[in-house]
Structures are given as structure tokens and as C-alpha cells.
Amino acid sequence: MNERNKLLQKLSAAQFAVWELHLYLDTHPCDQNAVTLCKKHEAEANMLRQEYTEKYGALKAECCNTTEWLSDPWPWDFTGGNC
């Protein structure tokens, strides 16, 4: 697995943890441990998202105020078997 895919996997795991904790907090809003853990994973996801954007470009078009993402390589522009 290349560095880009590893970073995406870490980001996906952090986002999944945030989502699951949000669901848990829907029914347990006073659980301060879960609130703290959710904030920790949100910060981690934000950091990983920023790192990915700096290294490989935007993950989605609406995250930036420019059209820079149009000049980034499209998925079919990548060569090799690292899909």
C-alpha cells in the first residue's frame, strides 16, 4: 500500500470513529468521555484531511475557493496498479 492510500485509510478510520461517536451521542448526550473522544477524533480527521490536501490536492471540489482541483490528476490519469 502506498503512502497516499495509507493516509486515506487513516482519514477514513478517523471519520468513521467520529460518525459512530455522533450516533452514540444521539442517545447518550451527557457522556463526557464520548464527547472528549469525539473531539479528539474530529481533530485527528481535520489534521489528516489537511495533510492529504497539502500533499495530494483537494478531496472534494467545495473545500476550496478556487478551481485548482480542475488541474489535479483525474482518477483515470493515474497509472500503475495502486488502485
Image (spheres, rainbow, N blue to C red):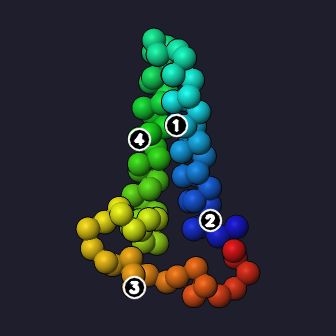
**What amino acid type should be assigned to the residue bearing mark 4?**
Ala
- Name the residue carrying label 3: 71
Indicate the position of residue 11 as horizontal and vertical percent values.
54, 52
- Which of the 4 image quarters holds residue 62? bottom left
Residue at left 51%, top 30%? 22
Q: Nearer the viewer, residue 51 or 58?
A: 58
- Residue labelled with disc 1: 18
Around disc 3, counting alpha carbons within 10 Å, would you say few (fewer than 14), some (14 to 19), or many (20 or more)?
A: few
> Given the image, on which type of amino acid does mark 3 rest?
Ser
Q: CA distance from mark 4 to mark 1?
A: 10 Å
User: Which residue is tagged 2?
Assistant: 5
Under mark 1, the amino acid is Val
SS at mark 1 in the image: helix
How crowded pointer 1 is (Cα within 10 Å; few <14, some 14-19, many 20+) is rated as many
Which of the two labelled residues, at mark 1 and mark 2, occupies the earlier sequence position? 2
Residue under numbered circle 4: 43
The amino acid type, in three-letter code, at marker 2 is Asn
Inter-mark Cα distance, 3 to 2: 21 Å
Q: Earlier in the sequence, mark 3 or mark 4?
A: 4
Look at discs 3 and 2 and give the one toward the viewer.
3
